[in-house]
């Protein structure tokens, strides 16, 4: 992400770093799910809990890919809006 000095970009920089981290994390999840043997079981952790539920591997992989695509799109939109602000 690119920002010029003098702009109040600390929030934008934080968001950009957050997107980059989430994208990297999601890529790892997609890669791990993609490389599992077909007979392996996949569990998803219940948010804010130590409880795990058995889930369908193919469906979960599809959901994770969609999440990755959405994160990439949102990150790109944010970068484009920052570039537009810089040009003005």
Image (cartoon, rainbow, N blue to C red):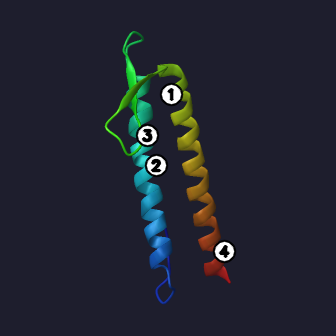
Which label lies toward us, 3 or 4? Answer: 3
Whole-angstrom CA distance, mark 2 to mark 4, is: 23 Å
The dot on residue 23 is 2
Q: Nearer the viewer, residue 47 or 10?
A: 47
Which badge, 3 or 4, is on the more N-terminal residue? 3
Whole-angstrom CA distance, mark 2 to mark 1, is: 16 Å
- Mark 4 crowdedness (10 Å alpha carbons): few <14, some 14-19, many ≥20: few
Q: Residue at x 64, y 78 (%)?
A: 85
Q: From the viewer's perspective, is 28 left or right of 6?
A: left
Q: Residue at x 41, y 47 (%)?
A: 24
Q: Which residue is mark 4?
A: 84
Instruction: Find residue 73 and report its horizontal and vertical position in percent.
Output: 61, 51
Q: Which residue is mark 3?
A: 27
Instruction: Find residue 52 and report its horizontal and vertical position in percent.
Output: 36, 30
Whole-angstrom CA distance, mark 3 to mark 1, is: 13 Å
Question: Is 40 situated above or below 83?
Answer: above
């Amino acid at each position: 992400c690119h920002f010029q000095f003098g702009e109040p970009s600390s929030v934008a920089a934080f968001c950009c770093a957050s997107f980059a981290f989430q994208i990297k994390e999601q890529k790892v999840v997609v890669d791990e799910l993609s490389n599992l043997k077909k007979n392996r079981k996949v569990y998803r952790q219940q948010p804010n809990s130590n409880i795990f539920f058995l889930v369908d591997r193919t469906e979960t992989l599809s959901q994770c890919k969609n999440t990755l695509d959405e994160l990439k799109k949102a990150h790109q939109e944010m970068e484009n809006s920052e570039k537009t602000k810089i040009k003005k």
